[in-house]
Image (cartoon, grey):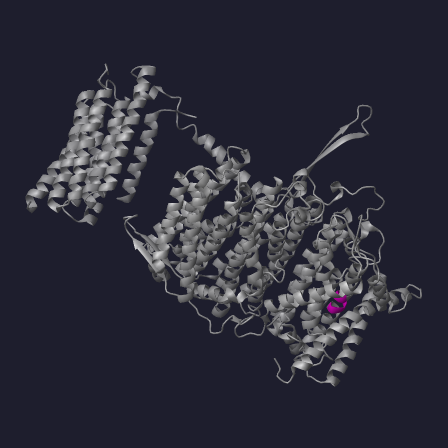
Amino acid sequence: MTPALLVATALAGLAASLAGAVTPDRLRIRVSTSLTIGACGCALIAGINILHSGHPAVVHTTALMPLSGFSLALDRFGALFVVISAVVGICALVFRLGYIGHGLGSRTASCILPLFVTTLLLVPAASNVTTFLFLWELMAITSLLLVLTDHAHRGEVQVAAQWYAVMTQLGAAALILGLVLLATRTGSQSFAVIALRSAHLPTWVRSTAFVLALVGFGSKAGAVPLHVWLPRAHPEAPGPVSALMSAAMVNLGVYGIVRVGMGLLGGGPTWWWLLVMFLGALSAMFGSLHSATSRDLKRLLAYSTTDNVGLMLLGVGASGLFASTGHRALAVVALVAALLHVVFHAVFKGSLFLSASSVQQATGSTDLDGLGGLLQRMPVSGPIFLVGGLAIAALPPFCGFVSEWLLLQSMLHGLPSSDVAIAVAMPIGVGVLALTGGLTAFTFAKAIGIGLLGLPRTDGAERATEVRRPMWVGAGLLALLCLVFGVAPFLVIPAVVDAAGVVTRFHSAGALTHGWQIGLPGVPGMLAPGLLALGLLVCTGLVALARGLVRRSPVRLTEAWGCGRELQTARMEYTATSFGEPLTRVFEDVLNPSRDIDASHIAESRYYTEAAVIHTSLEDAFERHLYRPADRGFQRWGALARRVPNGSVHRYLAFGLVALIIVLVVLA
Amino acid sequence: MNSSWSYVSIAAVSLLQVMLVLLGGPLLLGLMRKVRCRMEGRVGPPIRQPLLDLRKLAGRERTRPEHTSWVFPLAPVVLVATTLVVAAIAPLLATNPAFGWSADLFAVVFLFLLGSVSLALGALDTGTAFGGMGASRAMTIGALAEPALLVAILALSVPAHSSNLPAIITRSLAHPAWLATPQRVLALVAFVIVIIAESGRLPVDNPSTHLELTMIHEAMVLEYAGPDLALVKLAESMRLVVLLTLLADLFIPWGIATAPGPSHLAVALVATVGKVALLGVALAAFEVTVAKLRLFRVPELLAGAFVLAILAVLSALVVP
Amino acid sequence: MNGSSYSSALTLAAGAVLVCAVAILWLASIRSVIKMVATQGIALGLVAVVLGVHLRDAGLLAAAAVVIAVKGVAIPLLLGRASGGDSGSRESRPLVNVPASLVASAALIVLAFVTGRSVARFVGTTAGALVPIGLATLLIGFFVLVARRRPTFQIVGLLMVDNGIALTAFLCTAGFPFLIELGVSFDVLLGVVVLMVLSQRLRIEFGDIDLDELRELHD
């Protein structure tokens, strides 16, 4: 039954795409979105089936790709990611039903969005190299086209899309090289066969394949230093698309690293996983710092995705490190923590991006310095955003707290260790987790406090009203999941443990959850998030009751304390830039903010300033020190190479012939 | 869970802890203020003055700025509620309060963080410059204190192989020699610095300042009045007393009740009150001798605490 | 069809393809070149027919019919009509003169046989042994693209490249599936039409011209 569901997913997706291309304007969005939701539903049921039963579902056909065959084999590990993509997909598509504008209603967008969603659902199921690469490239191209949907109206979209296209293709090139290397060396394209034979490959082949896969998947996941496309592409994409990209697509980068590193290559030497942990730590710190000092809401969320991907990689690296030094049970715990973070991140990041799009639709802008007072003007979307923000800051009683706790526990139990690498890496890992946790709390206190609370800072924010129902239903479903998973994580954890067990090929003896508590097998230490939530609720109720009993009179509305000023206006409020200023100053050396002041003086005297304009900007350090010099280098090289083609068609054709002859000689 | 503890005794322990924190917090603040005044050559208000202040505030009118949302009145409630939950489940008087098996040190940290974030949101809701300033500064300090705090917790948890509070305390009681190791001393210093930062005492923040531009915590609560302000002040004192009690129990665990029975609890009560009072007096004496740090020197202090905490963890490798 | 007559028929047809290719390199007049291309297309179709009869594959026979129709008849007709008003119908000064290009084609045939050997061994069948012929046709077609000046000759070169690929496909795997063969043929047809339109416009704009004189194509 499950293979049929997988086929149904693909067919429904194709049908939705076709429907998007041919149905007339009025029905187009509804028909194509409903069909795509159907595809997600089939995938969701298939995934849950497999997570329960454990038998992989196989679909194999040679009709589409004659040489290698189009083959899907969904095991528990892949099923986890399929379920995540399906849930996020359903909520984003429900959101889309109410979303107008941004070019998303056009024929092209309605045709391509279902294809994108279908590839998100099928990539974790691909089980040979060709199928995987085909679906991967299709996902990249469809997401690129979706990012471009509004390019006619806004120039920045084209720049963002260029960056995205280049980085995606660089990553894909590395990925193709790595996977093809593995396939040719083991003599087979099927993942199952590669997994069996990879242990006999020489070390350099395995390491090269791993590093190439890390580069390829890392760029898709948005890990530093290949993350520069994230903060450019996500803000420019339409709402549901950016939610899908951040909550479903970047997960596939992590999926790929775990699948190749642990599944296909069966783990490796310590230095692989130290590299992964290093990249994870760097991404986490860099992402959290930039999101803390960012003033555009969507850019903030994009950098926060880099931060969370860093945390996931930290967990994956710790897991691999433990496995390579022999602590297999602990490796499973660390991998469970990382995968749990993947699940929870998808839920709260999806909700946040959808809420941010709601805010954008209601106010016309995502600049935090221009928002404010939205909690009262958007009585449903406001609290949904609040829930998402509290969840991502890892605060109880929401889900982020559980995954953060589990990550900390997995690092804690790695010590004491006789292995120097572990003994040094774990405290640094905890320090990184702590710093990014603190910075994330800072960031979302800023985002919620400045965006939702206080007085509206512009007319757009003043005139905001609640958005259409499908939009807040979509975002609200994910926010509800944040709360449900935070209170009852035992709904998710067993499935994650099984998925981790499949890819590490180790099934631990003890269970991770006993009823309402989470405990680690074999060591003392437990968490009862449901209990904490209950306790918080009870105490809050008691305190509010006590306050109400103590003084019965109603609350008097007054003016806020202003130190003797006349009126309170929005100009006196703190903005996002000012909120982040102390932090910017503390991390000045890393962030390198630039500040320009243009002052104009009155005609009579140079000592009196008439007007002053201050420009402050924060540029991404990797862009400035890595990408721009590389870009300049390429341009210089290109200018040199431009002298060779002189316009003669025959010369160009001759190049082609010579190249073909060289290839043939080499092959012979 | 030790089966010799009956449900009644467990519930009694939690209730006693909550009462201790609710009453002891303001009394501790009063004691500290008295010590400061005496050292400065003044008589000072009586020790129970903070309790009288709370009663006065409770009887006053509640006010609210006009454009605030429901976050503003909810913030003090959440702040007090988080501290209450910690007081109920953390092993302050005994190693087995209600649900003590779930009292994880990391969970305590995140609960306190929830309280801080809610207060910051309440401050930002007022829409004033002071609210924003206080929230910005408080969250910056909180974010920078997190690494030191969590790594110091790591240093304490590693020898006990768990971050579960009763487990750590039980192990300290079983291996007293462990308490004099360099690892513990370094972790202790790091903890003290972080507690000063988290509870807003000198040299990080001056709780009795009247100049708005020097405020961190006070600037966040300028708009609260009446019972709301009482809740905020109560939360402040509760947080300090819970942190100091945890510090005492983690580093000087003798006296804590390990078995049920009124005599054990009485001993524990006396011991805890004594330890916390001593720590409070020491802290107050220290406060008299230092001046408030410039805001941008505070990160240096916290970075120093982080380095100490890392050294504490790494020294476990050298000195097993 | 028994074994030896099958293999000799196949060798004949495939050989005819290669001979046409070399002849195109030798001939100078447009009309004869187009006639050669037509012959080459028909020879290609014959290869497919022989294979289809031997393997009793109806799909292959259908593919053969398509090939003969498109490459043997339709495209040469189109080319002929396009260059009907072509006054200077001789390639006066090729880039590489005729003796040199014949020597080059010999070298390319040798290269094709050397590199095609491993493929022929891999495929194993009688048909597979003739794969180097397809490779040689491809290389010679490419060479025509490089070495001839006039646009019409370049279209012919492109056609030869495609014929070489199709021949290799037929010999290796008994052809592509019918659907793909149809698609490829229409591809080629479309490409030829486009190229013809372009060369017509070139002629209208600039008269009979050497492609190399259009140097605006560089940056």
Horizontal arrangement in the rendering, residue A457 relative to residue A513 (left or right): right
Q: Is residue B134 above or below residue C85?
A: below
Of B314 and A76, which appears nearest the observer? A76
Task: Please tell me whether residue B240 belongs to the stretch shown in magenta.
Answer: yes
Q: Is residue B116 above or below residue A621?
A: below
Tell me, yes or no, whether the highlighted magenta stretch contains residue A209.
Answer: no
- Out of B142 and A57, give the one closest to the viewer: A57
- Asked if residue A245 is positioned above or below residue B235 in the image, the reply reads above
Q: Is residue A148 left or right of residue B257?
A: left
- Asked if C157 appears above or below B163 in the picture, the reply is above
User: Could you say where residue A46 lies in the image, as x and y percent from the top left?
Assistant: 40, 59
The residues colored magenta run B238-242
Q: Position of residue A349 (x, y in %)?
A: 55, 52
Quadrant of image for the N terminus of chain C: top left
**Which corner quadrant holds the C terminus of chain C?**
top left
What secondary structure prevails in the magenta region? helix
Residues A349 and B250: in front is A349
Left or right of residue A516, residue C201 in this image: left
Residue at figure coordinates x 29%, y 16% from the top left: C208
Q: Please state the horizontal and vertical placement of residue B139, each as a whole percent of the image.
A: 70, 54
Q: Which image quadrant for residue C199?
A: top left
Place of residue C168 in the rendered image (x, y in percent of width and height, measured from the top left): 21, 40
